[in-house]
Image: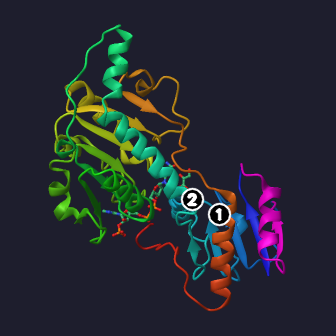
Amino acid sequence: MDIIFHHPTFDTQFWLDGMQQLIPDARVRQWRPGDNQPADYALVWHPPVEMLSGHSELKGVFALGAGVDSILSKLQTHPDMLPEGVPLFRLEDTGMALQMQEYAVSQVLHWFRRFDDYQALKLQAKWLPLEDYRREDFTIGVLGAGVLGGKVAESLAAWDFPVRCWSRSKKNYPGITSYAGNEELSDFLNGTRVLINLLPNTPQTVGIINSQMLNQLADEAYVMNLARGVHLVENDLLAALDSGKVKAAMLDVFAKEPLPENSPLWKHPRIAITPHLAAVTRPQEAMEYIAKTIREIEKGESPSGQVSLHNGY
Ligand SMILES: NC(=O)C1=CN([C@@H]2O[C@H](COP(=O)(O)OP(=O)(O)OC[C@H]3O[C@@H](n4cnc5c(N)ncnc54)[C@H](OP(=O)(O)O)[C@@H]3O)[C@@H](O)[C@H]2O)C=CC1
Ligand SMILES: O=C(O)C(=O)CO
């Protein structure tokens, strides 16, 4: 079995050695421009078109992250990049759900315990106990209830917050109210105080966090974008912060990354920023997942994690 690997920033040797150890009888190589030799599996992130195109012998292409939007958008301009019938897989969790839970829970608790207000008071040397927020006024709404959104919702429900989620299909997560489809979006938004985004980037979700959505949230709402920058209309968020509709935002992802130095988001006192690291690929867990998936494919099984090209995620 031949496995080819391409990632613009990962430690390639670590991945080659790791995959070799997990599948000892495989030949694992770094793909380099000009390499047109056949392969059974490809592990990729931002793959050059020529790495995959024409390779209909591939039994699987693995995206080395959870989101496949960069690959799918390249397919729009280069439809031959993924030969017909070659399945595309993505990483399901592989350690990312725990990171997302850490990120979301810590920030929700930060807002709920009013640490942002106390930080502002501290800068004025003001000793002023504020009224506690009540859990019943702190409904958390998670946009996207898949592998990551579902786990984030569960961890916040474990902290006894009222939690709801929104997805295409109905979910049955214990203690979480599920809303599905565009027809239930307004009900989901109505009363949501903390909006956490974990949707995939698809034509249906681009620009979804806009004025119309923000205006339907509870007053003094909080917004956390952990999915993709294109989901959020940044000027609409700034307007909602200025009007007081939104009290604060925590952003990990941006329409343009790295976020340009002159972006007004940097200077806004009620926006916190992290540089797209809410959840990163954990190499060992990812490799074990890929090796397990390859073994399942080799046995003729249908492993989970296959991307629906039709749905775009
Ligand atoms: N900031 C970071 O560091 C990282 C960001 N991400 C982002 O997180 C995203 C989510 O990852 P993951 O949870 O694994 O993805 P999943 O595919 O498991 O979940 C996606 C969820 O979104 C729902 N959804 C998709 N389209 C719509 C729509 N049009 N309307 C309503 N709901 C919709 C799906 O509904 P249904 O369940 O019904 O199909 C599903 O619940 C990734 O696509 C990626 O962009 C991922 C990793 C790290
Ligand atoms: O896995 C993904 O989709 C990411 O955004 C990783 O940072």
Please tell me in which quadrant of the rendered image residue 51 appears: bottom right
Residue 102, position as x, y percentages in the image: 47, 47
Q: Is residue 195 left or right of residue 81?
A: left
Quadrant location, ligand no. 1: bottom left
- Give the magenta range: 9-32
Kindly identify the amino acid type of the residue bearing the numbered disc 1.
Glu
Ligand 2 near label 1 (Cβ, under 8 Å)? no
Q: Dot 2: within a 10 Å radius of its alpha carbon, few (fewer than 14), some, or many (20 or more) residues? A: some
Question: Where is the N terminus found, in terms of image quarters?
Answer: bottom right
Residue 290, position as x, y percentages in the image: 65, 71
- Between residue 87 and residue 178, name the one nearer to us: 178
Kindly identify the amino acid type of the residue bearing the numbered disc 2.
Gly
Under circle 2, the secondary element is loop
Q: State the residue at coordinates (44%, 67%).
A: 312
Hey, which residue is sitting farthest bottom in the picture? 300
Labels 1 and 2 touching (C-beta < 8 A): yes
Magenta span contains residue 22: yes
Please tell me in which quadrant of the rendered image residue 7 appears: bottom right
- Residue that carries the numbered disc 1 in the rendered image: 285
As displayed, is residue 22 above or below residue 138? below
Q: State the residue at coordinates (71%, 75%).
A: 41
Q: Is residue 293 left or right of residue 259?
A: right
- Residue that carries the numbered disc 2 in the rendered image: 95
Q: State the residue at coordinates (41%, 46%).
A: 104
Q: Dot 1: within a 10 Å radius of its alpha carbon, few (fewer than 14), some, or many (20 or more) residues? A: some
